[in-house]
Amino acid sequence: MEYQTIKNNQTTPLTSIPVLAYEDFLAQNTSLLADQRYHCVSYHGVPQGIK
Amino acid sequence: MLLCCIADDAAGNILVSSALVNCSQTLPSFTAQRLAFHKFEREINENFGIEYIDHPWLKPVRFPQNRATGQSTIANYPFFRIESEELHEVGVGPIHAGVIEPGHFRFICNGEQILHLEIQLGYQHRGIESLFLEKKKLLQRTTLAESIAGDTVAGHTTAFVNLWETLCGYEADEDLQFTRTLALELERIAIHTGDLSAICTDIAYQLGSSVFGRLRTPVINYFQSWCGNRFAKSLIRAGQNHFPFNETLAEQLLKMLDAFEPDFDEMWAEFHTLPSALSRLEKTGVVTKEQVSNIGTVGMAARMSSISRDIRATHPHDLYPTLAHEPIIKHHGDVYSRTHIRYDEIKQSISYIRRLLEKIPPENKDRKALKKPAANAFSISLTEGWRGEICHCAITDERGELVHYKVKDTSFHNWLALALAVRNNEISDFPVSNKSFDLSYCGHDL
């Protein structure tokens, strides 16, 4: 598992957020939701040029 | 870049990861494995043109703007069809009787029974997220947050100011947190009470409609006497408090609640034991725990079906840690569960407010000024509005300017639950099912 762990109302440097290969990104986030303790609060696209 | 934020509700953490993709790529979808991602990927497809090889329902989310292709229009929405001489379709909206917002509901019915409902939204799209970037002044952005959904001013504005303060490295004083917590709970009482009135209206129970409707008024009027606006506009500001709470306001609030509670309890006692009312609410519009879990609903639309999902408990902010919130959980997933949650949550909110009023923090008259937002940063803010979870995310550039702003209203998760709730119900029960969710069109459409 590769992710940046933050709390509600926390700011983190953009560079702290891991960038995964899409296949790994998909596998990680879909497998997390197998456990009901996890739920998706936001999943969205960010336009090119940001990062 | 795709950015995914998963809440760990047991540990109170948020797990953030990303992937770089090309918009011309065709990708395997998250949705094929977890339905809870379906709306997020529909939005990504609409905004960026990314195609998915195995998304089962890749339909538009909002039509008017911010879409990668101009080919699809609101007039050629790809509705699900069933060819049969025995079935008929019923179209409702986007213009509705009464004063609700625009949205189109396409029913496929067998006689009076609903087989399928497809909900087409997007008519309220205003480009809110783009406006957050275009408007550079904090007051303009705060006003935008207040306008995301007119019934959730405290919910969305609290999410925005908390996000902005963390971006600026600002720790809110206790009086600011007090204002936000109190406003959120008052908003919950006001809207839930109005919803109880509307549910009574939809089952033609005139007494409940009138009394609950009348009881909502003193709550929103209290906001008026506090900040000059019945929907709490102008009350919540990042790093500022233009309407400091004081003992006089506390006395007024206690007086209002003391008058509200006995009438509210008396009306509830009548309503929830009335056989003719219960026959319309019980086992109507059922969404099972399994469905709710698969859809990934939040707020009341999760708690109605045994899922304890409440930001106040799992990711508490402002003064919620001091309240040690216990979510109200129901188990039948029907209109009655969604109605009963409202009663219980109103009572709980009143008890929280009484506790908050026991210790009113003094106004900080020597408040620090907000600094500039951090550069090259990502922030996230979650609040539990009356409807449920609200999420705001922001990204800044190397100068600390906002370059990305993302809003997710509760309704984004929950509209599908309504569509499933009405299956196999009589179409005449649709209005009360719809009202029992009371989802936001503008909050969804942004």
Image (cartoon, helix red, strand yellow):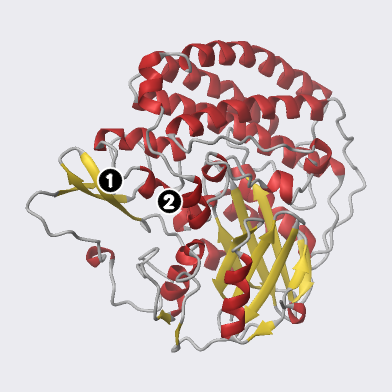
Q: Which residue is nearer to you in this view: B198 or B171?
A: B198
Q: Looking at numbered disc 1 in the image, what kind of residue is underneath it?
A: Ile
Residue count near mark 1 (Cα–Cα under 10 Å), binned few <14, some 14–19, many ≥20: few
**B9 w.r.t. B401: above or below:** above
The image position of residue B90, as x and y in percent, is 19, 46
Q: Looking at numbered disc 2 in the image, what kind of residue is underneath it?
A: Trp
Which residue is drawn at the image coordinates 47% and 22% (left, top)? B213
Indicate the chain on which mark 2 is placed.
Answer: B
Which residue is drawn at the image coordinates 54% and 24% (left, top)? B216
Question: Is residue B230 found left or right of B316 in the rendered image?
Answer: left
> Tag 2 or tag 1, which sits nearer the N-term?
1
Could you say whether the residue bearing mark 2 is in a helix, strand or loop? helix
Look at mark 1 in the image and give the residue it sits on.
B95
The image position of residue B420, as x and y in percent, is 37, 48
Could you say whether the residue bearing mark 1 is in a helix, strand or loop? loop
Q: Quadrant of the N terminus of chain B?
A: bottom right
State the image quarter where residue B160 is shown: bottom right
Indicate the chain on which mark 1 is placed.
Answer: B
Question: Is residue B226 found left or right of B219 in the rendered image?
Answer: right
Question: Is residue B418 found left or right of B109 in the rendered image?
Answer: right
Look at mark 2 in the image and give the residue it sits on.
B415
Which residue is drawn at the image coordinates 41% and 79% (left, top)? B52
Q: Which mark is residue B274?
A: none
Q: Which residue is nearer to you in this view: B251 or B300?
A: B300
The image position of residue B285, as x and y in percent, is 38, 38
> Residue extending furthest right?
B366
**B439 w.r.t. B399: above or below:** above
User: So how many labels did they put on this image?
Assistant: 2
Do we see residue B7 in this rendering?
yes
Do we see residue B134 in this rendering?
no
State the image quarter where residue B3 is shown: bottom right
Residue depth check, mark 1 versus mark 2: number of the one nearer the observer: 2
